[in-house]
Amino acid sequence: MTTASHLRVANPPPKPILIWDGECLFCQRWIERWKEITGADVNYETSQNAGDRFPEIPRDEFQRLVILVEPDGSVSSGAKAVFQSLRCRSSKKWLRWCYEHVPGFAALSEGSYKLIATNRSFASRITSLLWGKDVRPPTYFRARRWFLRALGLIFLIAFVSLWIQVDGLIGSNGITPVSEFLPAARAQLGNQALWILPTLCWLNSSDAFLHFLCGGGVVLSLLLVFGIAPALSLIGLVAFYLSLAVAGQTFLSFQWDMLLIETAFLSIFLAPWRLWWSKANQPPVSRPAMFLLKFLLFKLMLMSGVVKLTSGDDSWWNLTALDYHYWSQPLPTVFAWWADQGPEWFKHFSVAFCLVVEIVVPFFIWAPRRLRLIACGLLIFLQVAIGVTGNYNFFNLLTIALCLLLIDDSSGRRRRGALQVNGGTRAVVSHYFPDRLSTWAAIAVIVLTLPINLRLIYSAFEPAEEWSPFLGAVYQRADAFRIVNGYGLFRVMTKDRKEIVIEGSADGLDWKPYEFKWKPGDVMRAPGWCQPHQPRLDWQMWFAALGSYRSNPWFVQTVIALLHGKPEVTALFEKTPFSSNPPHYVRATIYRYRFTTAEEHRQTGAWWKRLELGEYLPSVSLEDVQ
């Protein structure tokens, strides 16, 4: 121990006082952090001002160490003084306990303190490099506000996008009517179907109720955007969107649908429990809730990167994945055509950049401010680049919204103390019971879901490893509600592009194609831009082309709907060649599609070139399918 630790003062202060060298810039920055942590429980004075009050302490001690003087007259210094001063915070008491009880912890702490104290100039530069000028504990009032508003906007997009398609997809005259799906599931699964398929549509599966869920989701989204009853709005949004996701069957089984539900569920614990969310007087931001959402971003990005390298697909290892991706992805934009014309070296560099951002950068989420902000910038840049070249609906926006939680209040402007006004925000200690209950609920969610999330991340590294029976059973229960999910887009790069062209005929001789709104068809039509809207039938057609119609029963149902001329289904297409009477026959042909080269485009004006591969679905009529 240091010399000061054996001293006692004759004139002790009324409460603990931490004395530090006021001429040390490094000390000045970190004292500001300790002040916010300890609050009013500890006083702070510079040795230049308070040193003379305690003549028992040698003056050179003040130059070398921080000194803590207790009300009983005892004195501690160095790392021990720091840990003693932090004991007033329950979350920091473990440091003092470790110092006093864990073998070697005290010696390691004092040795580290001495190393830093004797190299304060270097330590100050490292502090500036990693934290900037402010090392105080970060606050996230603005991040919470903008994240929840962005989440409300994304829900608004998701509900509106689905609303205009819901009749044709799962309505009573749609491709896979939920009114038929749920009774069939109940007949097969019995009462377990209620837990395996949690949806409000068990109460009512009519078209009117589907519209109620979509319309109600729109209203709840707007409430969240405007900060009205945010926590209650999120509970409703989770219930409504989960109900539609279950009812939507294969059309709402995308990873971003699961990500939206998981994000909204975790956001319930972050949102203020207020009827009207006032910017000027907000409750503290729940640290457990922030951890849950940051960990979700960490899991999303890390798993997305790791699965690419553990899938066995060599195109990720030899950096050739983008040689295929731009033209083989489900719904490319016109910018994908231009990117595909780029040099090979840049495509390979882009693959390497993507892997680094997805695998390495997520660890910076837990780093000091400047590294965290760099991670935020890189993650957002990757999402923008992906969104520019491909129509991934609201997925990129949702990931960017999660990245907003990495931007603390000090990043935009100088932040005042946690108990002072900060750009119009006043942080007050909340004694409101729902806020405290929400924090404890977030802690319970961490305890329950962290083992599953860690196992999901591990499965990205070891895909073949079996789950333990207990953890697997718990995950299966949680997975039904989409609140704990694994992620990993483009685990295996698609190296071929097959497109299905549906054609109808009145006589079996003259065949006319159905043109989709967004997926490739006419080779002269440029790839379109539809995000953040998701044309779900167009997306499913991409997956159908990877297999056969036998493995995609919804495709057969689409053909039957076209034979019947159901207007709800034909409305999902850009152009139907049979406006008055439905066709007597429908068939599907499969083609191989590629982007044209720049030279081919100049000569022909075509954006695509295609080669007929053969029959996907033979010609059928209503007589064949009845």
Image: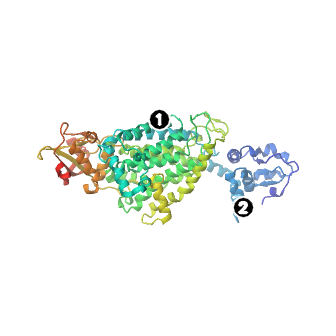
Q: Mark 1 to mark 2: distance in Å?
A: 54 Å
Residue 536 higher or lower than 549, as above or below: above
Give the number of the disc on residue 106.
2
Taking the image as drawn, is residue 394 in sight?
Answer: yes
Reading the chain from its start, which is encountered first: label 1 or label 2?
Answer: 2
Instruction: Tell me which corner region of the image, top left, top right, bottom left or bottom right, holds residue 113.
Output: bottom right
Instruction: Tell me which corner region of the image, top left, top right, bottom left or bottom right, holds residue 2.
Output: bottom right
Taking the image as drawn, is residue 133 in sight?
Answer: no
Residue 590 higher or lower than 284, as above or below: below
* Pointers 1 and 2 in contact (C-beta within 8 Å): no
Q: Is residue 191 left or right of residue 15?
A: left
Q: What kind of residue is marked 1? A: Leu
The structure residue drawn at horizontal position 46% and vertical position 45%, both measured from the top left corner, is: 239
Q: What kind of residue is marked 2? A: Ala
The x and y percentages for residue 283 are 62, 40
The x and y percentages for residue 574 are 26, 39
Q: Nearer the viewer, residue 66 or 70?
A: 70
Q: Label 2's element? A: helix
Looking at the picture, the colour scheme in use is rainbow
**What is the quadrant of the N terminus in the image?**
bottom right
Give the number of the disc on residue 222.
1
The x and y percentages for residue 5 are 80, 57
Q: Is residue 330 left or right of residue 67?
A: left
* Foreground: disc 1 or disc 2: 1
The structure residue drawn at horizontal position 72% and vertical position 61%, both measured from the top left corner, is: 106
